[in-house]
Image (spheres, rainbow, N blue to C red):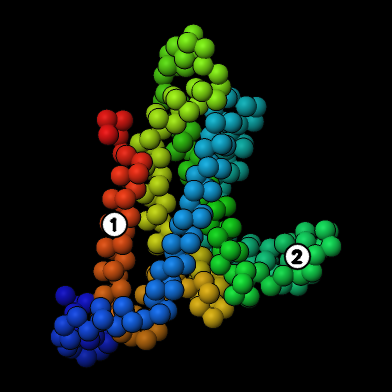
Amino acid sequence: MLSFTSYDMVSRPEFNGIGNYLEIFRDDIFWRAVSHNLILAVVGIPISMIIALVLAVMLNQGLKGEGIFRTMVFLPHVTATVAVAMIWLWIYAPTDNGLANIALGLFGFENSAWLTSPNTSLMSVLLVTIWQGIGLKMLIYLASMQGISRDLYEAAEIDGAGTIGKFWHITVPMLRPATFFVLVTSIIGNFQTFDLIFNLTAGGPANSTTVITYEIYQTAFQQFRMGLATAQSVILLIMLVVLTIISRKLVGGTDND
């Protein structure tokens, strides 16, 4: 109801019909924020899922030191995002003290303004989201793999299947429910990204890293246009529902789909 009103959290809400939605469709910054979320999702989620799957396959072989390695990979997920942002602010420091620039200097490259340049800021944030999201995906895949019956692999070996064949024809199909769960939760988490952006870039420079939730925050609590912010939130909800349906069509949620 509030999305159809003009409301500043002080005065009484005033009905303005679809005025908020019309303003959203004309708002270049909002749709730029949507495009940033889509880039983070389309590029970041598949990369993190692939890395997580590879790590899960390795850990499922019963490697030595598995527990320590699993903890190290999962640690970024449970670490407070503010702490994560502080670490990466140091890594991305634009001076010679930044770890990323130190690494570039070893190969003769000049310092880069990772988070303060519109050309590199979004990709820099993308790397952080990939790094932070691998751990949980890996554990989900690992738990799902450990539930696959060994009889299936033994039967495949009798039929002459190799390691790659068993992976593609047994492991991947049996992981469909886990893949669907990981994909949907990753999409939702991606469109809920706020604290990382708030602490790393505050949407800058020049709105090059603004995402939907940060734009909603700006509209509601910086501009005090709660009606418009509510309309933006409704748009976000609709987008998440549509993306979830698409994910289910692409991946499928159960073995019986």
* Apparent side of residue 161 relative to residue 110 in the rendered image (left or right): left
Q: Residue at x 42, y 16 (%)?
A: 152
Tell me which corner region of the image, top left, top right, bottom left or bottom right, holds residue 225: bottom left
Judging depth in this view, the residue of 86 and 242 nearest the camera is 242
Q: Quadrant of the C terminus?
A: top left
Judging depth in this view, the residue of 27 and 185 nearest the camera is 27
Which element type, helix, strand or loop, lies under badge 2? helix
* Apparent side of residue 254 relative to residue 93 in the rendered image (left or right): left
Which element type, helix, strand or loop, lies under badge 1? helix
Q: Earlier in the sequence, mark 2 or mark 1?
A: 2
Q: Mark on residue 101?
A: 2
Q: Residue at x 48, y 51 (%)?
A: 45
Tell me which corner region of the image, top left, top right, bottom left or bottom right, holds residue 169: top left
Which residue, given by chain and number where applicable, does mark 1 sit on?
242
Other-residue count near label 1 (Cα within 10 Å), few / some / many at <14 / 14–19 / ≥20: few
Of tags 2 and 1, the one toward the viewer is 1
Q: Quadrant of the N terminus?
A: bottom left
Q: Is residue 49 above or below residue 226?
A: above
Other-residue count near label 2 (Cα within 10 Å), few / some / many at <14 / 14–19 / ≥20: many
Q: Residue at x 33, y 82 (%)?
A: 26
Mark 2: amino acid: Asn
